[in-house]
Image (cartoon, grey):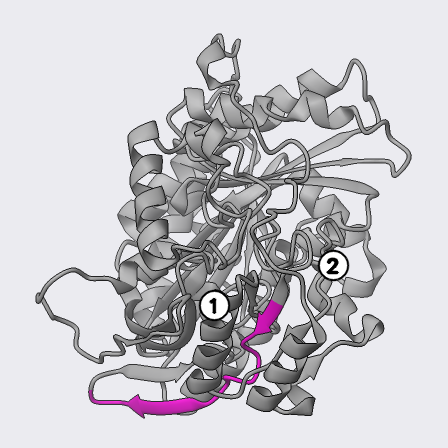
Amino acid sequence: AARAGARALFCGSRASRSAASSHTAFACGPAPRLSTSFRLFSAASKPERDPRFAKIQDADVAFFRSVVGDSGVVTDAEDLIPFNKCWMEKYQGAAQVALKPKNTEQVSAILRYCNDKRIAVVPQGGNTGLVGGSVPVHDEIVLSTSLLNEIESFSAQDAVVVCGAGCILQSLDSHLAEKGFMVPLDLGAKGSCQIGGNVATNAGGLRLVRYGSLHGTVLGVEAVLADGTIVDNVSSLRKDNTGYHLHHLLIGSEGTLGVITKVAIATPRRPKSVQVAVLACQSFQDVVEGMQAARAQLSEIISAIEFLDRDCLDLVVAEPMYHLRDPLPDPYRFYLLIETSGSNAEHDQAKLEAFLESSMTEGLVQDGVVAQDGVQGGELWKLREKIPLALQTQGKVFKYDLSMATESMYELVETMRSRLRPRYPDAKVFGYGHLGDGNLHLNITAPADTDPAILDEIEPFVYEWTAERKGSVSAEHGVGVMKTGAIHLSKSGEMLALMRKIKEIYDPNAILNPYKMLPPSSAA
């Protein structure tokens, strides 16, 4: 019966296991006592403007026009709105000028001038971040990389693409698809995020479990330092063991050390066979064991392991603009989305069928559906990718991107539900994320008129809870301005001191993306 069920499941229909799972429900248990030494939050409010920075004058604007032309200087208040505001409308600055240089030399001239004049600069790509890293805090000028969007070269022999920082991720991937290759990064914001911003924030994405982080796939970068120095470290070499690998400092630096203008990225072959399955589980313990089974049985073809809870699925399906429906006839507490990518469809399908059969026999999977083609696969992926946008319709949204041991991920979701229920019964807590990377996206929603004091029940508790379990307060979204007061929970005082020294070397006047990444010196 199990064999027949797995086969039916694989053929694109649904199969369920009537026998109850032998696994017990995931138990949270009491949270350990939090160390009081962790309560050092200094960024609870907007940081004050640094008086060292100059305010923009007419002469400055005139200089910028001489460098990038009239079309490259934005000063109109209405036109500045998208540069000053993040897509969630959570962070908003007051930049009076945004600049759109067309090449690296223009970026160099701008930064050299700003460094001399002590004008603070915020590098900005697609502005799709979630921690306020790409928008001004005060009146810093915005330096947009959107026009640095040339694909300079691609070598099929070396499987390396060299392109400008302003290339849209989806457009770059489409360009490579025509040649049988792909960008080793996929994000829900791929239609608007830029590759330079991806690199500057070390974006993780949906397929890190297969292709690794950008520290492994970015072979080199071109960047402009605060004083205008152009550092050309663009390389197509897979192996170069000469000296310090300085480009790794820029990957994940969030624009605080330099402005990335060009990148060289190793590009894997585009898979010929892609299989997508959504599987239902009764408990989070089954989700974790299902992931372990997938790693063991699908190791060479696994390309994504995602999870979402029932509340996430209900939210996405209820949103009429997405035209999505529940893929299964009965509701379950948890769902696994598993994707495989390979070169032989027959081989991959056989391996997936064997995995599904064994998972159902062991009671890890209760029901599921497998896409029969790319269109169906895309619809199943939307159930996961549309969650962030659907959450934005729910009033106030508090978003947390955390990494921790996989077995602890959903414990935090249930802990937050118990914590908020007495005082904020209308608040809802959602859990989803990159299960294969131990990356939880914890989202808390509340009606728009909820008392702002709800934040005191969430922060710093969420960060402290994560730190107590040796997790990270930022798995992939970065630090930005949101988490400068929490970075000490993931980085020791010694490490923060070294980071400050690096910042002083690269940007001695601290003009690049101020108020971001590092906490104020007094809080370190």
Check if residue 171 falls in the magenta segment.
no
Disc number lying in front (1 or 2): 1
Left or right for 84, reference 467: right
With respect to residue 449, does 335 lie above or below?
below
Residue that numbered label 2 is attached to: 94
Q: Residue at x 60, y 82 (%)?
A: 64
Q: Residue at x 68, y 44 (%)?
A: 312
Proximity of marks 1 and 2: CB atoms separated by less than 8 Å: no
Name the quadrant of the C terminus: top left
Residue nearer the viewer, 308 or 465: 465
Alpha-carbon neighbours of circle 2 within 10 Å: few (<14), some, or many (≥20)? some
Span shown in magenta: 142-157
The amino acid pointed to by label 2 is Ala
Query: x and y percent of residue 22 in the render?
Result: 46, 23
Residue that numbered label 1 is attached to: 116
Check if residue 156 falls in the magenta segment.
yes
Q: Residue at x 63, y 66 (%)?
A: 141
The amino acid pointed to by label 1 is Asp
Residue nearer the viewer, 321 or 19: 321
Residue nearer the viewer, 434 or 78: 78
Residue 242, picture quadrant: bottom left
Query: x and y percent of residue 420 in the render?
Result: 73, 20
Left or right for 368, reference 290: right
Query: x and y percent of residue 133 in the render?
Result: 57, 54
Alpha-carbon neighbours of circle 1 within 10 Å: few (<14), some, or many (≥20)? few
Between disc 1 and disc 2, whose residue precedes?
2
Left or right for 25, reference 70: left
With respect to residue 390, does 64 lie above or below?
below
